[in-house]
Image (spheres, grey):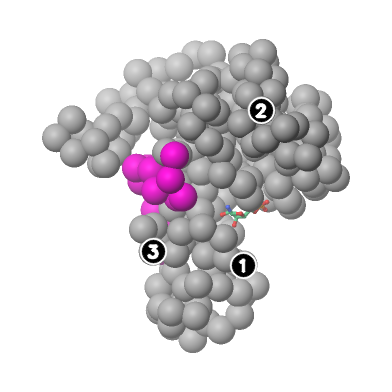
Amino acid sequence: MTSETPLPIAVLASGTGTNLQALLDTVHGQEAEIVAVAANVPGASALARAEGRDVPTAVFLRGDYPDRDARDHAMADWIAARGARLVVLAGYMELVGEPFLRRFPGAVINVHPSLLPAFPGLKAIEQALAYGVKVFGVTVHFVDAGVDSGPVILQGARELPDARDPEEVLAALRPLEHALLPEAVRLFAWGALSLDPENPRRVVAAAPDAR
Ligand code: GRF
């Protein structure tokens, strides 16, 4: 189950791009090759991070297309033309619709700052603080047509019983995100991820010694 050739991947981002940076600093040029970075926000810092490593970038604004599906088709065309075989949503603050997902079946993953299925959607950390949880976490999951509802690949948690400030929680979760997202990409690139036939919600990761 070894992969000599890096897996071509695309990254979608909307903001600061620290998760993209984690991928650039770890799997890029190793198990994976980031061949495209697309944003839905002009000037997103993620774009500069990609350009700094000579990774092709593009911006796909919702307002430039008649509807979201048309924009997603254009984005999928651009990504596919660069040969990407995995799409990573790394702080991409929009849903991708079924037409986009059909272009990359079983090959779109997302990182979300909560222990799903708790607190899907926007402002997950604020939701968790408002609920009063004592344990916060991060989920990397396959993307389906729902909101943060696809099968879980990896999760990590931090006990923060006294947390009150979203920024403090985010700072505590960052290292988890920046470790789990590259690890999920590695597992995907190795072909180590599959769905349990008895429970297709359950993602099975092959044991490391099977690689
Ligand atoms: C991360 O917290 C991620 O979990 C969420 O959006 C944030 C993006 O951060 N989906 P960055 O742009 O990667 O720094």
Residue 171: numbered disc? 1
Q: Name the residue rendered at 69%, 31% in the picture.
A: 71
Residue 51 lies left or right of residue 102; in this view the side is right
Where disc 1 sits, the SS reads helix
Q: Which residue is mark 3?
A: 118
Circles 3 and 1: CB atoms closer than 8 Å: no
Q: CA distance from mark 2 to mark 1?
A: 36 Å
Which residue is at a point 61% across and 47% down the rendered structure image?
A: 94
Residue named by callout 2: 70
Nearest to the eye among marks 3 and 1: give it: 3
- Using the rendered view, name the quadrant where residue 203 is placed: top left
Mark 1 belongs to which amino acid?
Answer: Ala
In the rendered view, does 35 fall on the left or right side of 102? Answer: right
User: Which of the marked residues, 2 or 3, is nearer the chain's N terminus?
Assistant: 2
- What amino acid is found at the position of numbered circle 3 in the picture? Ala
Q: Is residue 149 magenta?
A: yes
Residue depicted at 57% across the width and 65% down the height = 123
Q: Secondary structure at mark 3?
A: loop
- Which is closer to the viewer, label 2 or label 3? 2
Looking at the image, is mark 2 or mark 1 nearer the viewer? 2
Q: Nearer the viewer, residue 7 or 118?
A: 118
Circles 2 and 1, Cβ within 8 Å, touching? The answer is: no
Kindly give the residue lying farthest to the front in the view shown: 66
Distance from label 3 to label 1 (Cα)? 19 Å
